[in-house]
Image (tube, rainbow, N blue to C red):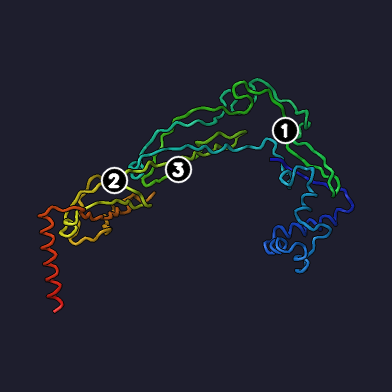
């Protein structure tokens, strides 16, 4: 990270800074920004605010930092990054699980590739047996100063030296890691996946990411879960959804059927008189709550009643008799 200190020697800078302050106030204040967007500077003046010689706050900032690489290249502060430890970046790994493993959890051994501290130079990046020399670009300071002329005068920008990376020293690079202090290696890690994970779940394994530099801490490993859908059972958070079909006779008289669950085949009672699209609840046959394995969701079974499109003559006769009987009962109840 570059550190910057700005110096201004223009006698008219005070006026310019007032204009800058006004512009920043407009850009950072939602109400004033809205007035400017809708009505321009007239809206600001109507609210008792002006912009000096600049009618557009964006133009003011652009003119101020023109030729200096934009505002992103400037900053405040004076702490040097010389020899500062840099933490390692996190590493990400995608793990594909089948439906049942995601529900109940599983132990997996995964293989990752990451940056580890170089054993040849012990992470220093320097060739063993060599002595670092003073950087000739920055004179050993770790920082360089660049100047730029702006409407406010001459600004001096203090930046991290690109030659030595802010250390102030130039070392003969290690032949193994080419001076980075780290090498890419493969490692196998045993991973315990908890019950209840779902697609998009992230498991964090601390300090198993990329190694840091100059004594910085290692990053973490994030394992991103992707679950292969089950062709029959559908998941809705901690509940599992299933659709079964029963005949109209079974729906009328009631029956017991076997339905698949994550625990295997289980008997389900279909009560007499079950209506089409009725949902029956199989308690605690769903997915365990993540990190609370003693709690489980339910399996919700939606009952579809199958109505035959064709009937045999005998079946039709029985249905007609049933219909006549039903009509007779209805007529009796109306008397």
Name the mark nearer the viewer: 2 or 1: 2
User: Of the numbered discs in the image, which one, if any, rests on residue 162?
Assistant: 1
Task: Give SS at disc 2.
Answer: loop
Q: In this view, does 325 lie to the left or right of 2?
A: left
Q: Is mark 3 on a helix, strand or loop?
A: strand
Q: Is residue 261 above or below residue 209?
A: below
Give the crowd class for mark 2: few <14, some 14-19, many >=20 residues within 10 Å: some
The residue most toward the front is: 313
Q: Tell me the residue that label 3 is attached to.
A: 203
- Callout 2 touching callout 1 (CB < 8 Å): no
| Mark sitting earlier along the chain (2/3) | 3
The reply to whether discs 3 and 1 touch (Cβ–Cβ < 8 Å) is no
Asked which quadrant contains residue 135, the reply is top right
Q: Is mark 1 on a helix, strand or loop?
A: loop
Q: Name the residue under label 2.
A: 262
Q: Is residue 248 above or below residue 324?
A: above
Mark toward the start of the polypeptide (3 vs 1): 1
Alpha-carbon neighbours of circle 1 within 10 Å: few (<14), some, or many (≥20)? some
Could you tell me which residue is drawn at 49 percent across and 28 percent down?
186
- Tell me residue 90's x, y (percent): 54, 38
Picture coordinates of residue 92, whole percent (x, y): 50, 38
Earlier along the polypeptide chain: callout 2 or callout 1?
1
Q: Nearer the viewer, residue 285 or 276?
A: 276
Identity of the residue drawn at 84% across and 58% down: 53
- Does residue 46 lie above or below 190 as drawn? below
Image point (73%, 60%), residue name: 26
Question: How many numbered dots are placed on residues in this image?
Answer: 3
Relative depth, front residue between 257 and 253: 253
The reply, left or right, for residue 25 in relation to residue 238 is right
Q: Between residues 125 and 203, which one lies in front from this camera angle?
A: 203
- Quarter of the picture containing the N terminus is top right
Q: How far apart are marks 3 and 1 (CA)?
A: 37 Å
């Amino acid at each position: 990270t570059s550190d910057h200190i700005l110096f201004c020697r223009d006698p008219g800078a005070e006026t310019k800074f007032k204009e800058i302050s006004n512009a920043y106030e407009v850009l950072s204040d939602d109400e004033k920004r809205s007035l400017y967007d809708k009505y321009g500077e007239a809206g600001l003046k109507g609210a008792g605010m002006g912009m000096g010689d600049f009618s557009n706050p964006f133009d003011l900032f652009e003119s101020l930092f023109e030729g200096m690489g934009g505002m992103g290249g400037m900053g405040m502060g004076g702490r040097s990054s010389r020899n500062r430890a840099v933490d390692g970046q996190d590493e990400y790994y995608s793990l594909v699980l089948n439906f049942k493993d995601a529900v109940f959890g599983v132990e997996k051994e995964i293989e990752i590739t990451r940056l580890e501290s170089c054993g040849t130079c012990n992470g220093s990046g320097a060739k063993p047996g060599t002595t670092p020399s003073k950087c000739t670009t920055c004179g050993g300071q770790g920082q360089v100063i660049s100047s730029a002329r702006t409407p406010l005068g001459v600004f001096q920008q203090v930046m991290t030296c690109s030659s030595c990376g802010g250390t102030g020293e130039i070392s003969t690079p290690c032949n193994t890691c080419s001076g980075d202090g780290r090498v890419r290696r493969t490692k196998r890690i045993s991973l315990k996946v908890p019950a209840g994970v779902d697609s998009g779940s992230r498991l964090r394994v601390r300090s198993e990411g990329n190694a840091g530099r100059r004594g910085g801490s290692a990053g973490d490993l994030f394992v991103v879960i992707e679950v292969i859908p089950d062709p029959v059972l559908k998941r809705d958070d901690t509940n599992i959804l299933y659709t079964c079909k029963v005949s109209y006779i079974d729906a009328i008289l009631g029956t017991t059927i076997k339905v698949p669950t994550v625990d295997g085949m289980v008997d389900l009672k279909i009560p007499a008189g079950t209506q089409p699209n009725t949902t029956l609840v199989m308690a605690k046959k769903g997915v365990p709550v993540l990190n609370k394995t003693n709690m489980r969701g339910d399996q919700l079974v939606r009952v579809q009643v199958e109505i035959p499109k064709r009937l045999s003559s005998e079946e039709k006769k029985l249905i007609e008799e049933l219909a006549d009987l039903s009509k007779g009962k209805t007529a009796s109840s109306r008397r």
